[in-house]
Amino acid sequence: MTVDPIIAALVILSVLTALLFAGGAGLYRRIRELELAVHTGVGLGVPIGDGPLPALGVPGRTTIVVKVDRRCPVCEEVLDAVGRLAPALPRDAGFTVLADGPGVAAGLPEDVRVVRDPDVWRSVTVPYVPALLVVDGRGTVVHTAPAGSARAVAETVERFTARHAKARYEEAGHGAGEVRR
């Protein structure tokens, strides 16, 4: 039994094409994962302290940045939650509201910083609004989450304050995982 050389060549080309397609699909998936990691904002540096852009964070302080815009239907609910939760934050933490223009985020408590700068707003590249970003004292985003409701804001703040309290406990000389008798 002999195999026609044209059929053999077509089979080999089909197998090679399938392998090339599978490799390309894997590469495309990996690129999308990397893009998503960048777009979620984790690891993004944001302005802190003095500089050409208004600061979103405060050096040495953890900041929860709330990104809102004037066309967002749930942003008022999120901002009301920020106003209620701000007094409960630890002293070395605070809220910053990042708005895309004037008139947004009016009526918040004085201890909530409000930045109304479209350039800074555009520089914080998360793919959703409203968004919560937890920024450490060095200006690095360590957590992001959509803030689709007051409950989502409260849950993120609760998780943050629990982790914050645990870190302070460990810094005070109590080891992680230490068993007390």
Image: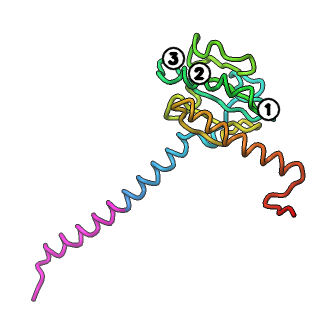
Number of the front mark, 1 or 2: 1
Task: Provide the residue designation for mark 1.
Answer: 59
Q: Residue placed at 58% from the left, 27% from the top? A: 67
Residue beneath disc 2: 119
Residues rendered magenta in the picture = 1-22
The dot on residue 172 is none
Q: Is residue 98 left or right of residue 176?
A: left
> In the rendered image of this protein, does residue 144 appear above or below residue 55?
below
SS under mark 1: loop
Residue contact between numbered discs 3 and 2, judged by CB atoms under 8 Å: no
Decide which of 161, 27 is in the foreground and name it.
161
**Between 131 and 138, the one nearer to me in the picture:** 131
Residue most extreme to the top: 103
Q: Are marks 3 and 1 in contact (CB under 8 Å)?
A: no
Judged left or right of residue 73, residue 106 is right
| Amino acid type at image mark 2 | Asp
Tell me if residue 137 comes above or below residue 17 in the rendering.
above
Furthest residue in direction front, as rendered: 181
| Residue closer to the observer: 61 or 5 | 61
Mark 3 or 2: in front is 3
Q: Report x, y in % for residue 86.
A: 71, 26
Kind of residue sitting beneath label 3: Arg
Q: Are marks 1 and 2 in contact (CB under 8 Å)?
A: no
**C-alpha distance separating marks 1 and 2:** 21 Å
Q: Residue at x 77, y 24 (%)?
A: 50
Question: What SS does tag 3 mark?
Answer: loop
Q: Which mark is residue 70?
A: 3
Asked if residue 80 lies left or right of residue 91, the reply is left
Decide whether residue 114 is among the magenta residues: no
